[in-house]
Image (cartoon, grey):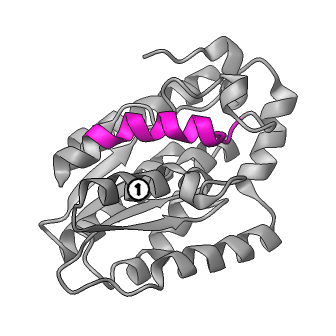
Amino acid sequence: MHFNPNRFFSSVFVLFFGLALVSCSEKKVETTQAEAISAKTPESKSDEKIILFYGNSLTAAYGIDPEDGFAGLTQQRIDSLGMNYKVINGGLSGETTAGGLSRLDWFLEDKPDVFVLELGGNDGLRGINLTETKSNLIKIIEKVRSKYPDTKIILAGMQIPPNMGQEYASEFTAMYPAVAEEKDVTLIPFLLENVGGIPELNLPDGIHPTEEGHQIVFETIWPYIENKM
């Protein structure tokens, strides 16, 4: 792993400014809810398989054109290969695991053949009890699996700065492999591998990737997705 913690954690001010952007205001949440709904609106062909990215502002490609985010890039790669898959972007800026659990049913009206779960970052930045976060991640996985036993699930691991203490940050990082092992799902160890903490690959908030950063994230996740198709 080539994550540079010194660069990632260098400025508490920048990170808390980024937290405000990740968590978002009520007005921003209302806007991104509409964006998430519109992303699901187009009807799929009857024989078209679905890849559902389910997450927060990282999945929603905050600050850039969604087509240039890793979910949009996944669709572009699929189209270039002539594969019969449709990507649905279920990203919502400011989303927590609790919020993700509460809105999941709507996204499960259609069966996702591949379900990519990218949540928890906002929980960590807000200092939410990790027992609750872990429980929510497990419940999301169980709900998907209960309704669609054949759906292949991928969990995207995350890391956070030690604003809430080093012990909390370490336990947060360890939570993802623990959930993946407990629920027997595929784990992407760190979604922002080779992107987190690198200023030129992130927007001024220091947290959300630029277009170039999303390209690197896409290359990180694509082997996991391709393996499930």
Q: Nearer the viewer, residue 89 or 46?
A: 46
User: Residue 81 occupies which quadrant of the picture?
Assistant: bottom left
Q: Which residues are magenta?
A: 207-223
Q: Does the magenta run of residues contain 217?
A: yes
> Which residue, given by chain and number where applicable, does mark 1 sit on?
76
Q: Position of residue 177 (x, y in %)?
A: 32, 34
Say whether residue 129 is left or right of residue 7.
left
Between 146 and 86, the one nearer to me in the picture: 86
Instruction: Tell which residue pokes out farthest to the right in this image.
Output: 13
Magenta-colored stretch includes residue 108: no
Neighbour class for label 1 at 10 Å: few (<14), some, many (≥20)? some
Residue drawn at the location 62% of the way across and 42% of the way down: 211
In the shown orientation, is residue 82 left or right of residue 28?
Answer: left
Residue 161 in the image: x percent, y percent? Answer: 66, 28
Is 120 located above or below residue 16 in the figure?
below
Q: Is residue 25 above or below residue 216?
A: below
**Residue 185 shows in this picture:** no
Q: Residue at x 43, y 59 (%)?
A: 136
Position of 79 with respect to 16 (left or right) is: left
Q: In this view of the protein, which residue sits in the foreground, 162 or 30?
A: 30
In this rendering, the answer to whether 131 lies above or below 16 is: below
Type of residue at label 1?
Gln
| Secondary structure at numbered mark 1 | helix
Q: Quadrant of residue 52?
A: bottom left
The percent coordinates of residue 95 (x first, y second) are 60, 61
